[in-house]
Structure formats: C-alpha cells, structure tokens
Image (cartoon, rainbow, N blue to C red):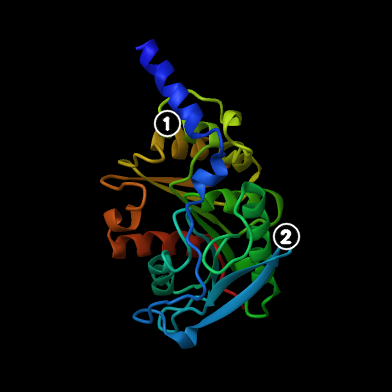
C-alpha cells in the first residue's frame, strides 16, 4: 500500500510540477460575446455591465426581478468554477423566478472578462461586483443578499467577511479550504502549499461573517465531500444558520434533487426572512 501511495505521489508531483491549484480550479472558456436564452428572462429585464478589476475589464448582467413576483430584493450571485455566466444562466433564471433582482458576473479569464483567474483576482472581482451593485440607485444596501455556489462561495465569504455584511448569505456546496479540497480530490494527504499559491480558507473566514447563513450541500457530492467541507464551514459559522443536506444531489445537482419548486420556496423563504424589501 505504501509503495502504491509513493508511486501515486510521484505521478501527482509530475502532473502538478508546472501548475498550481488555481489552474485546476479555473477550467474556464473564453467568449467574444454572450448568447443567453430569453425563454425565462426577457432581454428587456437584463442589463449588460462592464466593470474594472485589477485594471482588467470584467463583465456581468444585472437582471431586474420578475414583475409578477418582485420583492425589490437584490442577490449578488457568485457562480462556480466550471465555466462562464452563460453556462450558469439557468441558475440566474431560478432567481428571476424567485422574484429578486440578481447580478451575475464573470471572473477574470471567464467568458468575455479579461485577465487571468487566481485567488486574488477572484476576491478583487467579487469586490468590484459588490461596488457596482451598491452604486445602483435601485439597489438598497439593506436589501442585498449574497449567494455563492462552489468556487463562488470563496468570493461570497471573502466579501462578507471583509467588505460588506449582506442581509443574509446563501452557500451551495462550499469547500473548506484548498488543503481539504486537494485531499478530497487527489485522495492523498498532500499539503496545499505543495501545488497551490492560494489557501481559499473558507472554513476560517466564515468565522468573521456575521450574517444569517443558509448552507445547502449534496449528500452524494463526490467532488466536494459534504462532511469534510460543507459541514465544517457550517460548524464554524456564526448563528443564525441553517444546514440543508440534499439526498441524491451531486456537486451540481442541488436544485434538481430538491426539485425546482422546493428549491425556489426554500431560498425565497430564507432570503425574505432576513432581507427587508427596498423602500
């Protein structure tokens, strides 16, 4: 067994000798333009936004809430690592159905955004997105909630810990830290510093957040183990907090496993409980 681990360690070392965790966390796709469905969100309800982060242009969409279900609440949405906002557009559609304004944006190197993704860039991009949302006359600071998914949880937690306390914080499938993520994914106890420039220490940063927390995590998540990650982040969080373990859900499957109507009801109820509508 030891010899097998040694062989695997050498193979991992060679594989990672020319890269770091950032390059593994950000398998993004570049775009020259976005092609977004209008099946749920009409073009008249969305606004294309250009921002600057670390001297680079990054892009997003501000989506005005569905008039039929509007609450005048705004959600700043931090998407996952897999791809650009076009890939996660179905999640923006869920928030349109919830009845809130939502701002979804691409990190550096994603979609149309310039630059190269990294931990520091992720935090800078997240802060630029916050500054943009707060600059809008139709957004009240007291009616602003955060939602982070997967990698996006790192951005949401960092901003909530050091920049702005949202009315509430929703996290879906967060990882505890770079070290825990590597141990879970590689199945070897390799120090994160061996191949990573960053720490992404969500489990420690969450201690600095003083906002009501809703954490949802798939029980069958094989990418980010619920017990080593989501449960640790939740245990370190300040109250009030709610933990929803979702049976049958893998890493991307929380909304689907919960069922769209139940997911919408759960998220809407939590956000409305702690977020007063803008006046």
Asked if residue 97 is positioned above or below residue 116 in the image, the reply reads below
How packed mark 1 is, by other alpha carbons closer than 10 Å (few <14, some 14-19, many 20 or more), is few
Seen at 56% across and 37% down, the residue is 18
Q: Which residue is mark 1?
A: 186
Q: Which residue is nearer to you in this view: 231 or 268? A: 231
Q: The N terminus lies in which quarter of the figure? A: top left
Quarter holding residue 131: bottom right
**Numbered disc 1: secondary structure:** helix
Q: The C terminus lies in which quarter of the figure? A: bottom right
Seen at 60% across and 68% down, the residue is 143
Tell me the CA gap for discs 2 and 1.
32 Å
**Residue 159 visible somewhere in the drawing:** no
Task: Of the two numbered discs 2 and 1 on the same chain, state the one appearing first in sequence.
Answer: 2
Asked if residue 105 is positioned above or below residue 258 in the image, the reply reads below
Give residue 105's position: percent from left, percent from top.
55, 66
Asked if residue 212 is positioned above or below residue 203 in the image, the reply reads below
Give residue 118's position: percent from left, percent from top.
61, 49
**Numbered disc 2: secondary structure:** loop
Give residue 262's mark. none
User: In the image, 202: left or right of 94?
Assistant: right
User: In the image, 170: left or right of 167?
Assistant: left
Give residue 13's position: percent from left, percent from top.
50, 27
Q: Which residue is nearer to you in this view: 6 or 94? A: 6
Seen at 67% across and 49% down, the residue is 120
Quarter holding residue 53: bottom right
Q: Which residue is mark 2?
A: 54
Give residue 176's position: percent from left, percent from top.
52, 37
Find out whether the residues at labels 2 and 1 contact each other: C-beta distance under 8 Å: no
């Amino acid at each position: 067994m030891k010899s097998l681990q040694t062989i695997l360690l050498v193979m991992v070392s060679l594989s990672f000798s020319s890269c770091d965790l950032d390059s593994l966390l950000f398998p993004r796709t570049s775009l020259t333009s976005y092609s977004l469905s209008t099946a749920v969100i009409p073009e008249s309800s969305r606004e294309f936004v250009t921002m600057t982060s670390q001297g680079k242009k990054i892009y997003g969409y501000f989506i005005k809430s569905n008039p039929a279900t509007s609450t005048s609440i705004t959600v700043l949405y931090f998407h996952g690592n897999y791809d650009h906002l076009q890939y996660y557009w179905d999640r923006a559609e869920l928030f349109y159905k919830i009845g809130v304004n939502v701002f979804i944006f691409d990190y550096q190197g994603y979609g149309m955004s310039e630059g190269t993704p990294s931990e520091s860039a992720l935090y800078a991009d997240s802060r630029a997105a916050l500054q943009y949302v707060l600059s809008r006359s139709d957004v009240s600071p007291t009616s602003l909630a955060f939602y982070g998914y997967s990698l996006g949880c790192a951005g949401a937690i960092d901003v909530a810990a050091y920049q702005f306390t949202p009315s509430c914080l929703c996290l879906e499938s967060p990882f505890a830290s770079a070290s825990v993520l590597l141990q879970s994914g590689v199945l070897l106890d390799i120090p994160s510093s061996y191949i990573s420039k960053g720490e992404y220490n969500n489990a420690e940063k969450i201690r600095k957040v003083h906002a009501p927390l809703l954490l949802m995590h798939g029980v069958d998540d094989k990418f980010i183990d619920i017990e080593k990650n989501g449960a640790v982040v939740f245990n370190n969080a300040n109250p009030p907090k709610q933990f929803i373990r979702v049976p049958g859900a893998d890493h991307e499957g929380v909304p689907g496993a919960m069922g769209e109507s139940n997911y919408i009801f759960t998220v809407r109820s939590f956000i409305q409980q702690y977020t007063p509508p803008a006046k």
